[in-house]
Image (cartoon, rainbow, N blue to C red):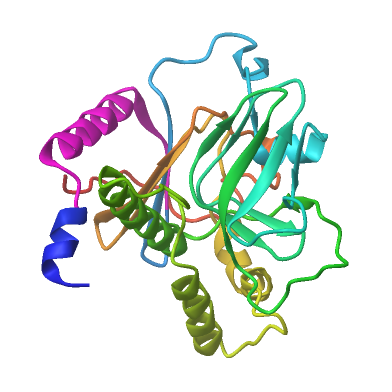
Amino acid sequence: MDDASHTRSLPSPALIQAARDALRQALAGLRPRMTMERDGLVLMALEPVTARGAGASDATPPYLLFEQAVAGGTVEVSEIGAGTVPSVAAKTKDKPVVIFAGDTITGGKQNRFINISVWLSAGKVTELPVTCLEHGRWDPGHAARFGAGRKADYALRSMVNFQVSEQRRRVHEFATAGAPAAHAFAADQGEVWAEIGRREVRAGRRSGTAALHELWAAEEHDARPLAAAFPCPDGATGLAAGVGGRLVALELTNVWFSRSTRPDRRPSESSSPSRRTTRWPT
């Protein structure tokens, strides 16, 4: 990609400022709940400034997260007809469902990555743009339905998000000239497959079907001690991560985390990391 085309793909100053304002507003209502450190990695659990009222943790939101909906049978994701790589169908029942960009689905004819965040209205069938995460399998005899997989890592989510943004820009340019706006939210499938291949080489592991989920499963064992060292406190609604005194990641949600969504591990246990207050440059 040349420098000029890369420049055209950048968001406008107005969009950048709007994003900064939205982030500033969201952060203004949060405060640190617990700060943990181990091996140079600092994690800060965030909670709302306004404390919950009695029983607030039991309040039922007007929607379900995708993983919850799949587990409860209130959403079904399936191949469309005989199957097509860049799209699947999601059918909801009596409640809306939120599916996020970077969520993954397993099964069907091949595992897929959800390209964009979508609000799935209740009682509707919605076509979802997806990207294949399993180059070596297209199983015509496999069940057409999918289960919920793990959320993709930040690096892959960033890659696909950039690719989809580029595709949207190109579609907009061609649509202005009268061309059809097909595959408006597609990623670069070839580059995603190439990235999976590069990861397999780095890990020294190969999947028989080039399935990224198999690589993730193999690496999960290595990450367990570090994950266990950072217990998620009740009431947290976000997470900030820092390395070397700098903020490197931030994720917010309006869903309350509780012991029912994580291993029952207390911060006071001897293997817990040290806790201290950390300030990162803004």
Numbered marks: total: 0
Q: Residue 32, located in which quarter of the rendered image?
A: top left
Quick one: 48 or 19, which is closer to the camera? 19
Quick one: 244 or 268, which is closer to the camera? 244
User: Where residue 250 appears, x then y in whole percent?
Assistant: 37, 45
> At 60% from the left edge and 68% from the top edge, which residue is drawn?
133
Relative to 98, is 207 on the left or the right?
A: right
Q: Which residues are magenta?
A: 10-36
Q: Is residue 136 above or below residue 276?
A: below
Q: Is residue 276 above or below residue 57?
A: below
Query: Is residue 34 shown in magenta?
Result: yes
> At 25% from the left edge and 50% from the top edge, which residue is drawn?
173
Assign the N terminus to one quadrant of the image.
Answer: bottom left
Query: Is residue 281 shown in magenta?
Result: no
Farthest front residue?
A: 178
Q: Residue 107, located in which quarter of the rendered image?
A: bottom right
Q: Is residue 8 above or below residue 267?
A: below
User: Where residue 70 appears, x then y in whole percent?
Assistant: 76, 40
Relative to 11, is 118 on the left or the right?
A: right
Residue 271 visible (yes or no): no
Assign the C terminus to one quadrant of the image.
Answer: top left
Residue 258 visible (yes or no): yes
Q: Is residue 117 above or below residue 79?
A: above
User: Where residue 135 appears, x then y in whole percent?
Assistant: 63, 76
User: Where residue 56 appears, x then y in whole percent?
Assistant: 60, 13
> At 66% from the left edge and 68% from the top edge, which residue is drawn?
213
> At 63% from the left edge and 44% from the top edge, which residue is drawn?
266
